[in-house]
Image (cartoon, helix red, strand yellow):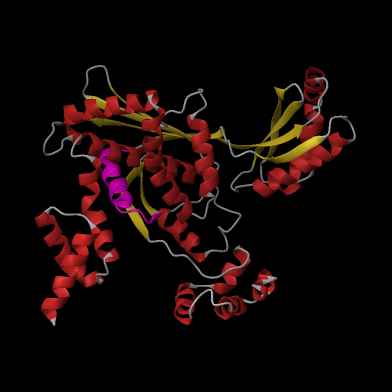
């Protein structure tokens, strides 16, 4: 594929033509790529070897009442029922008085790891004694951050093995995601220590385990608000509490429990231009902090079994500036829709969405079952995959529900019969 050499140096149109010339794509497929390329110039600024924009649907989650304030929350997701479930869970909590949140700090950890250490305890003491000096060096590497009220706050030293020691620097990045800030500050400290310490530096880099950037959401729901057609609210609440306990005991259940939470967390993070992969990494690492992988949320009944109490704590190193946030117009619009003006506010919203998403999933799971709750929206996707046009979905959906069939083959068969009858 000689025509693909130095692909990154080609213009967008030249890249598409190179794929045509090498018979990797057809001319019709090139048109698909061109059609989806909503802003090639912006795409070229964001990533290398840009081809097109891969579009995901965005919708609004409703009924969010957080600390007494109402929010419309943009969510970007391809999974059916996520936004519906989010709004449903939020509506129950809204009726119960809404979410109460607490955000503790916005500190990111950066690591400078020394290898080939011969005397780890001595090195640990040496680094700790230099704390004031090292923090000063870090802040001098990024003075504008300190002027905005951020900067290096404190450090810790951990002996990881007989030959490995990690110097961890806690840095307040204010409203930004701050990866580049943290890394530049670490490099300055590492360069200074390189002249002071015999053990070589293995690496200097940000850690995504943001356990000093925590957000918590809680709610209290009268059990009658959880009533389902086939189950009393008291029964639903009791089952949710047991399902929550199960996610604390069994990592197999906890993984799915947390995946449901992250359905909502990621959808908001993407809509707000944040690094959802970093948030995922932090959340799952935080879930195993006790030594066993556990559910990130907990639900329990109060002393007289009349109120279901829910809470969740997540590491949320989120941002409202930096990265792609300021250059993507849709992110700016989404911030306006949610009326977000600070990283703290965004963390309050995201952690609340995680708790609402979890409530909706557990309520469905312990009552009608998760599949039945998702079936209608999943069926729509199946019918579209069978080749139906949007205006044909309702007809085929009704027929499949009557037949109690949900598979692709049935959808294709019904669609074929519909088309035959029309000709």
Q: Going 41% across and 53% down the picture, which residue do you hit?
A: 338
Residue drawn where x is 52% and y is 70% of the image: 52
Magenta run includes residue 68: no
* Quadrant of residue 88 within the rendered picture: top left
Nearer the observer, 423 or 198: 423
Quadrant of the rendering where the C terminus is positioned: bottom left
Report the number of numbered marks.
0
Q: Nearer the viewer, residue 146 or 232?
A: 232
Who's the residue at 48% across and 42% down the image? 347
Please report the residue visible at 50 percent of the width from the left and 61 percent of the height from the top.
332
Q: Residue furthest right?
A: 195
Horizontally, residue 119 falls left or right of residue 79, namely: right
Left/right of residue 120 with respect to residue 171 in the rendered view: right
Coordinates of residue 162 in the picture (x, y in percent)? 75, 21
- Work out whether 320 lies above or below 365: below
Residue 79 on the magenta span = yes
Q: Is residue 252 above or below residue 318?
A: above
- x and y percentages locating residue 71 in the rendered image: 37, 49
* Residue 94 visible: yes
In this picture, residue 176 sits left or right of residue 88:
right
Q: Nearer the viewer, residue 371 or 194?
A: 371
Front-most of 96 and 417? 417
Highlighted range, magenta: 75-98
Q: Look at the image and tell me whether residue 342 can be seen.
A: no
Reply above or below: 212 against 45: above
């Amino acid at each position: 594929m000689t025509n693909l050499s130095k692909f990154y140096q080609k213009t967008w149109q030249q890249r598409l033509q190179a794929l045509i010339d090498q018979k990797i794509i057809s001319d019709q497929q090139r048109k698909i790529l061109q059609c989806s390329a909503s802003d090639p110039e912006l795409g070229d600024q964001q990533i290398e070897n840009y081809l097109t924009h891969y579009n995901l649907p965005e919708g609004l989650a409703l009924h969010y009442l957080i600390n007494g304030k109402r929010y419309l929350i943009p969510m970007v997701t391809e999974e059916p029922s996520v936004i519906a479930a989010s709004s449903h869970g939020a509506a129950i909590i809204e009726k119960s008085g809404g979410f109460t949140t607490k955000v503790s700090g916005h500190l990111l950890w950066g690591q400078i790891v020394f290898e080939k250490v011969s005397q780890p305890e001595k090195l640990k003491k040496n680094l700790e004694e230099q704390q004031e000096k090292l923090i000063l060096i870090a802040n001098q590497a990024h003075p504008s951050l300190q002027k905005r009220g951020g900067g290096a706050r404190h450090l810790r030293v951990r002996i990881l093995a007989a030959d490995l020691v990690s110097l961890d620097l806690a840095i307040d990045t204010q409203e930004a995601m701050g990866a580049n800030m943290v890394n530049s500050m670490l490099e300055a400290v590492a360069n200074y220590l390189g002249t002071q310490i015999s053990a070589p530096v293995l690496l200097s880099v940000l850690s995504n385990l943001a356990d000093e950037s925590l957000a918590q959401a809680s709610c209290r729901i009268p059990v009658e608000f959880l009533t389902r057609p086939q189950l009393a609210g008291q029964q639903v609440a009791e089952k949710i509490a047991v399902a929550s306990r199960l996610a604390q005991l069994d990592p197999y259940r906890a993984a799915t429990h947390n995946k449901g939470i992250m359905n909502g967390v990621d959808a908001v993070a993407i809509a707000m231009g944040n690094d959802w992969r970093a948030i995922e990494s932090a959340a799952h690492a935080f879930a195993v902090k006790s030594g066993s992988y556990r559910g990130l949320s907990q639900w329990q009944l109060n002393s007289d079994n009349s109120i279901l109490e829910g809470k969740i704590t997540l590491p949320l190193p989120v941002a409202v500036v930096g990265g792609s946030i300021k250059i993507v117009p849709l992110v700016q619009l989404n911030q306006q829709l949610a009326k977000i003006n600070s990283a703290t506010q965004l963390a309050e919203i995201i952690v609340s969405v995680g708790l609402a998403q979890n409530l909706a999933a557990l309520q469905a799971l312990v009552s009608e079952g998760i599949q039945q709750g998702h079936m209608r929206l999943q069926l729509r996707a199946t019918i579209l995959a069978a080749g139906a046009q949007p205006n044909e979905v309702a007809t085929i959906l009704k027929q499949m529900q009557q037949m109690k069939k949900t598979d692709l083959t049935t959808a294709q068969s019904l669609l074929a019969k519909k088309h035959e009858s029309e000709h």
